[in-house]
Image (cartoon, grey):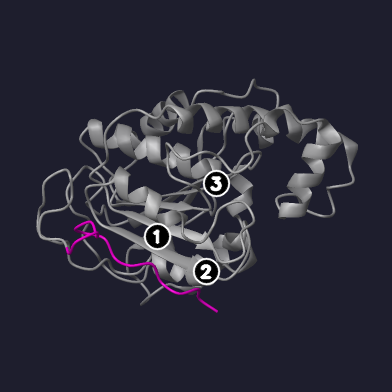
Amino acid sequence: MEARTWVRPLHPRAVPGRRSVAAPGGGNGGADGRHRTRIVCCPHSGGWAGSFAPWRDHVRELGGEAGTPGTELLAVQYPGHGDRGAERPEGDVAAMAAAIRAELAARSPARLLLFGHSFGAIVAFETARQMEAAGTPPALLAVSGARAPGRPVASPGDARLPDEELWRRLSALGGIDPLLAEDPDVRDLVLSAVRSDIAAHERYVSAPPPGATGVDIRCYLGSHDPLVPADAGAGWRDWTTGRLVTRVLAGGHFHLFENPRPLLDDLLAEPPAHPPAHPPDGHAGAPPGERAGTEPESAAWR
């Protein structure tokens, strides 16, 4: 595979899917007999496509009857990360999203679930916006471990921390494999990309483009995340005119790798029926203080 490719498959063949669900509208809604559903994962700051490799077995185990159309698991490789380490990191979220959207547009149609964790949630959000503007919105945007655009990041200025301090913070969060955390060569390679990602994240959320997306958002938060509180899902209500559902899962900032099964079970579940159409302000028909098309936050899953 060409090293400059952004979107990478994480398994050589389709994994059996759970249910046959038609996507609502857009070019990603059909099935071509090969992949009914496509999960595309955008990694955290300093992460790489292979960060999501542990999801492969879980997705496979969540399969339904033999012979049903498959679920394809893909992940994004940012420049300056993984096997693209020789490239200069991309510091503009909109440019990253444009490259991802272009590669997804070249793929066969499928029901697209766009997932992003932490910094990747912001990249996924902007990608969903651009896909929607192009007339091919994803079926669902799933954001994890991230405050909404317009909300301050947890630790502003992290991109300017000394190497040792920044590395300690990343290691304490669980974002660095303990076997690699003591390797100075790995540290030097990863930190350049991490700093670029953190700076790009801060720039985007401090001045996000105006306007909400019509794509449904599912927000996943860790019950013991030291960076993003469990009530941060409410901030995403301003960024969708569709349905917002928040799930709080047991775990820290990297809950999606600590125990991915509950998240994947929910992500691949058949979506509930859409609420009636409502104006962009999202309040028509909603109880006082609650946005139409949203659901209350769940309790933490144990």
N-terminal of the two: label 1 or label 3?
Answer: 1
At label 1, which amino acid type do we have? Thr
Quadrant of the drawing holding the C terminus: bottom right
Which mark is first along the chain, 2 or 3? 3
Residue indicated by mark 1? 71
For residue 118, the mark is: 3
Q: Residue 20, image x and y in percent? A: 26, 67
Q: Image point 45% across, 23% down: which residue? A: 95
Residue 189 position by quadrant? top right
- Tell me which segment is drawn in magenta: 287-302
Q: Which residue position holds label 2?
A: 249
Comparing labels 1 and 2, the label whose residue is closer to the camera: 2
Residue 44 appears in the rendering: yes
Could you say whether the residue bearing mark 3 is in a helix, strand or loop? Answer: loop
User: Does the magenta-highlighted stretch encompass residue 105?
Assistant: no
Residue 193 picture location, percent across and down = 68, 30
Mark 1: give few (<14), some (14-19) or many (20+) Cα within 10 Å: many
Q: Position of residue 117 (x, y in %)?
A: 53, 49
Q: Do the CB atoms of the residues marked 3 and 2 lie less than 8 Å apart?
A: no
Q: Is residue 208 above or below residue 49?
A: above
- Depth order, front residue of 119/90: 119
The answer to whether residue 292 is left or right of residue 276 is: right
Q: Report the amino acid beneath label 3.
A: Ser
Between 57 and 265, the one lying in front of the other is 265
Q: Separation of disc 1 and disc 2 at Cα?
A: 23 Å
Q: Which image quarter holds the N terminus?
A: top right
Element assignment for label 1 = strand
Q: Is residue 97 above or below residue 111?
A: above
Cβ atoms at labels 1 and 3 below 8 Å apart? no
Left or right: 155 as drawn, with respect to 26: right
